Image (cartoon, coloured by chain):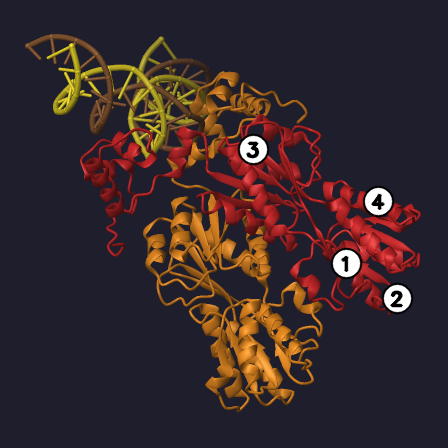
Chain colours: A orange, B red, C yellow, D brown
Amino acid sequence: MAGAVPRIGDGRVVIGDVAAAAGVSVTTVSHVLSGKRPVGAPTRARVENAIEMLGYQPNPSARSMRTQRTESVAIVIPDITNPFFPLLAAGVQDVLHPEGYLISISDADLPSRSLDDVLRQVLNRRPDGILMASYGSTGHELNRIIASNTHLVRLSGAPEDELGDIVSSDDTAGVAGVVGHLAERGYRRIAFINGEQSTAPARLRAEGYRRGLREAGRRFDPALVRAESFTRAGGVAGARRLLELRPDALVCGNDLIAVGAMDVIRGAGLTVPHDIAVTGYDDIEAAALLSPALTTVHNPAREIGRACARMLLDRITGVHTGPAREEVLSTRLTVRDSS
Amino acid sequence: MAGAVPRIGDGRVVIGDVAAAAGVSVTTVSHVLSGKRPVGAPTRARVENAIEMLGYQPNPSARSMRTQRTESVAIVIPDITNPFFPLLAAGVQDVLHPEGYLISISDADLPSRSLDDVLRQVLNRRPDGILMASYGSTGHELNRIIASNTHLVRLSGAPEDELGDIVSSDDTAGVAGVVGHLAERGYRRIAFINGEQSTAPARLRAEGYRRGLREAGRRFDPALVRAESFTRAGGVAGARRLLELRPDALVCGNDLIAVGAMDVIRGAGLTVPHDIAVTGYDDIEAAALLSPALTTVHNPAREIGRACARMLLDRITGVHTGPAREEVLSTRLTVRDSS
DNA sequence: TGAGCAACGCAAATCGTTTTGCGAGGAGTA
DNA sequence: TACTCCTCGCAAAACGATTTGCGTTGCTCA
């Protein structure tokens, strides 16, 4: 059936062409498409036939002009190079592509543009929803989001302010668990390299570090904590400083940091986990490939992406209209060889 | 200056509001924005002031309705989970975000949707350009692209057909180089695990494998070649079969395949590179983290992304209108511990 | 046979821009 | 003074859909 696809002119078929081909008015074609009003079976058949023949597809710009909806969502992430985020994006696609949504991804890490600039650019396209996984925001532009009719889901924030729904994994429990595990194995000086402390996950994970120590009956020493960035370079920087303090375990805010830390440890002639244990967070695919394989907290990135997408969809379609919701996915400690 | 951002009503400011605030007509506002006609300095100042005050941003749907351009490009990739592609996307962003383009990413690997479905969905949004990194296509839908006024850049295809510009790394030379390297080190039975043979990179790399053998004066044995898929699972499948043939080196079509192959080799109680050498292609970040670190061909993903974006931009803006161009980036053999 | 009622289709307004033909006013020149 | 140019701004027509108020038509039922 799909064999012959006649083209008209330069390939642009508009609703009027379909109407003409089917011998009806454009209204009728639109009604067939939307189902907003009943259309007689024979007529409907003629219209559908014409649509098929001409290969007609409604122009999204024209459509969203009337409807005020773009059927698109934007994902704002800090660093597309961090394997956690592509997986997150894949989860979003799982849910939203079948629904016909366009998904755009904006990397906010570009040093040339501020998060506000990125947000302005994103908002300008009037997406129906935004998934903000880039957290450092101070608000200003965030307020524009709620002022517009764009729905917002944040990854791992505080539900305090009325800034949309939240999906998070239980960061605090995750890191507390890893600290407990290290304490159990007898590590005494457990240090912590965190990511950007302005971000929600960093705050929650720092909280988890303290909680883990407390629960293990250990003293919290601020000198053993460093806030860098959620990158390999951040891990390098953090480990350089902390190694001087002779810790015997290094809890890292994410796997990338752990990789960087291991670079430094190896460079210093030490071995993991004999001289010093290292743990990560996220469980990116590379974690299992490292040598030694990384003990880390498994963060279900793709599931999180799906959850975010579903929440967004609920808002966009009006299935849920009430107050902000929060969904917390659970993490799982994955013990490998580095601890 | 940016402190006060007055909101009107529900936050939707249209060009007419700006015109009213500045005491001019909408035409004048448009001319200030586009610069298509001269506008007097004092008037222009009033308009710009009003735009700033109201926080006006032109509605992209309305705009593209007239201009027939969406200022967006789509990236179609086989698998966002393969770290090569996020890096590619980052390169595209490097070039296109500053220009104000919206970048959407569509993962074509979803088993639920055919490439044709994905392309239809992508084309429906009328992007100004498409970067196709998903190659298996048999044409049908590809032809729709050229029928529309959407520009196409393909990653690593054959320039034969008039299907847009091409950017590729020198796959053939890359693999030939790695084969030569192995031969030089004295490996005798060099096998090859490839990805989907319907794709352009797979064909080029297979060609490189043969050329490498030829240049080293070795015999080509079809039994030592397997075409699987460009994934870790593909590597597992390929290695399972090939190991029975007792090769002493395994050239893999990409790094993911190499990872899968090493899984199998380890499982068989063999060690790399002592019992068998393994090489990859792409040089994803994990390649250096593997144990043993992977000998691979460095593929400049981000650079490739930038090159694609520039080619697309040249077409979109009309800087280049001639026949299809091809840009080949060079690869570099990166010898580590696995060979 | 005529009133009443569905069922269905049409015309026209609308969404927010860009673009173009035209005219008003002022400056420069003969 | 009259003529020609500029410079600059306005009004109105697209772009391609959705939506709504009304008119037809044909049927049922009394």
Residue where numbered disc 4 is placed: B211
| SS state under label 1 | helix
Amino acid type for the residue under numbered disc 2: Asp
Earlier in the chain: of badge 3 and badge 1, it is: 3
Earlier in the chain: of badge 2 and badge 1, it is: 1
Q: Give residue A41's position: percent from left, percent from top.
A: 53, 24
Q: Nearer the viewer, mark 2 or mark 1?
A: 2
Amino acid type for the residue under numbered disc 4: Arg
Q: Is residue A87 visible?
A: yes
Compute the Cα span from label 3 to label 1: 35 Å
Q: Nearer the viewer, mark 1 or mark 4?
A: 4
Residue where numbered disc 2 is placed: B275
Same chain shared by disc 2 and disc 1: yes
Amino acid type for the residue under numbered disc 1: Ala
Residue where numbered disc 3 is placed: B151
Earlier in the chain: of badge 2 and badge 4, it is: 4
On the image, which quarter does residue C26 sit in?
top left
* Marks 2 and 1 close (CB-CB < 8 Å): no
Earlier in the chain: of badge 4 and badge 3, it is: 3
Q: Is residue B196 visible?
A: no
